[in-house]
Amino acid sequence: MNVRYLSTLTIVSLLTLGGVAACSNPCAAKSPSSNAGTELPSDPCAGKNPCAAKADPCAGKNPCAAKADPCAGKNPCAAKAQSLSAPLAPELQGKPVVVDIYASWCSACENIAPTLSQLKDDYAGKVHFVVLDMSDRTTTAEAEAKAQELGLGDFLATHKSQTGMLTIVNPDTGEILAQHRNNPTLSDYTTVLDTALAQ
């Protein structure tokens, strides 16, 4: 009795497992062997891949694909002429002007200090040197007032955070002849100053 019961239970279990296996794989039930006389493709699930029709389903979705350089033309400085809005104050006329945006805590200012010192020695009496000190609130307020008097108010408003920057300006036109930040290379300044003085 027990043997029959166990045999029946085993057969029922095997049939149940077979049914579960067939349901878990939807393509397994479509095997060619179970449908004699009916022609089925070798892969009954072929054509069911939603991406199969496209070589690259993401092709054409790159927002930068249309541009060789997606950032071209986005240089914020490109449209601005290298010039101040007007000539500088009368007391700065007749000599090139070197504007130094300085702060006591600025490592770039410390780096260019020997270069600036050399320029002051080499061009004493030939060039105007203007220091705009951004070290603290008091010196910044004084520098802003000084810049307004000299015709550099807009320039300082734009560049006050760029300490360690030296700018060479033609005072007659307000044209910026050179502008370098944290650049201790002496020749980058002397070449421009010598050319300006020769004119």
Image: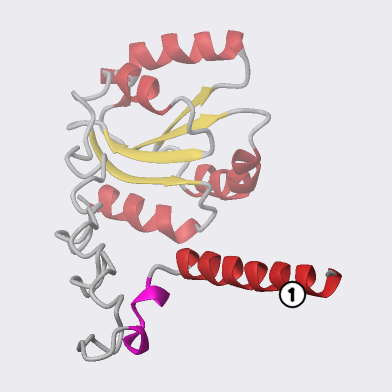
Q: Is residue 4 left or right of residue 65?
A: right
Q: Residue at x 65, y 73 (%)?
A: 11
Q: Residue at x 51, y 67 (%)?
A: 19
How many numbered tags mark residues here?
1
Give x and y (percent) for residue 32: 32, 87
Q: Amino acid at mark 1?
A: Ser
Of residue 108 and residue 53, the one placed in the foreground of this image is: 53
Say if 133 sits above or below 138 in the image.
below
Residue 96 visible in the picture: no
Q: Which residue is mark 1?
A: 7
Determine whether 95 is above or below 148 in the image.
below
Q: Quadrant of residue 47?
A: bottom left
Quadrant placement of the N terminus: bottom right
- Identified at 59% across, 10% down, the residue is 137
- Please check the rendered image and state whether residue 32 is part of the magenta-colored stretch, yes or no: yes
Of helix, strand and loop, which one carries label 1?
helix
Where are the magenta residues, as a range?
27-34
- The residue shown at (34%, 16%) is 153
The reply to whether residue 42 is visible in this rendering is: yes
Residue 66 lies, with reference to residue 53, above or below; the image says: above
* Above or below for 30 versus 96: below
Q: Where on the picture, by quarter, is residue 86?
A: top left
